[in-house]
Amino acid sequence: EYITGLKITELCADISTFVPGRLLDDDGNVLLHFEGGAKGILHASQIAAGEENNLNIRVYGEKGGLEWRQMEPNSLIVKWLDKPMQVFRTGGVGPIYPEAQAAARIPAGHPEGYLEAFANIYRNFAHCVRAYEAGHKPDPIHADFPSIQDGVRGMRFIEKVIASGKSKAKWVKMG
């Protein structure tokens, strides 16, 4: 939802535990339906040998696709239908959105990622708190952090995935 701006309307989950003795599931696949008819797939696994906590995000649409990989966090791959593929990098030269540039904490060529993402959330939240305390409206570029509603919706998503995984009917409304 954060990436596309589209709300999940329903989901169908298959969750499993393959490693004997594990208290939690270690493999999950979720089909997602979004507002406006978009569809998605979420795959999370602790049994995918050799993946090294690999996180990939791909979004496809009418004009092409976007791909981001945690192993190469400074690059965004744009795959056009009618043009060659492009790679955009944070901190470098080229047309980067101000929001992406504001999230870059170190110079080009140095990898950023997991820890810096949390640091950006904390920084943005603190910036907004300081602005409100000073009687100012915060700069919108710093208003990019999860809300209480986002947290509640995230917990609801987990509950619905578990409910779907246990259900014979499978498809569950997000509500």
Image (cartoon, rainbow, N blue to C red):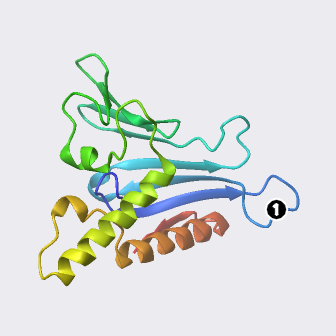
Residue at numbered disc 1: 22
Q: In terms of image quadrants, where is residue 26?
A: bottom right
Left or right: residue 77 versus residue 169 is left
Residue occupying the point 28% across, 16% down: 84
Q: Is residue 81 above or below residue 98?
A: above
Quadrant location, the N terminus: bottom left
Residue type at the position of mark 1: Arg
Report the residue that reaches farthest toward the top: 84
In x, y percent, where is residue 95? Answer: 18, 32
Q: Is residue 117 above or below residue 83?
A: below
Report the residue that reaches farthest toward the left: 136
Q: Is residue 4 above or below residue 83?
A: below
In x, y percent, where is residue 11? Answer: 48, 60
Report the residue that reaches farthest toward the right: 20
| Secondary structure category for the residue under label 1 | loop
Residue occupying the point 22% across, 37% down: 96
Q: Residues within 10 Å of mark 1 (few under 14, many from 20)?
A: few
| In front of the other: 149 or 168 | 149
In x, y percent, where is residue 69? Answer: 47, 37
Left or right: residue 52 versus residue 6 is right
Residue occupying the point 39% across, 66% down: 122
Quadrant location, the C terminus: bottom left
| In front of the other: 173 or 154 | 154
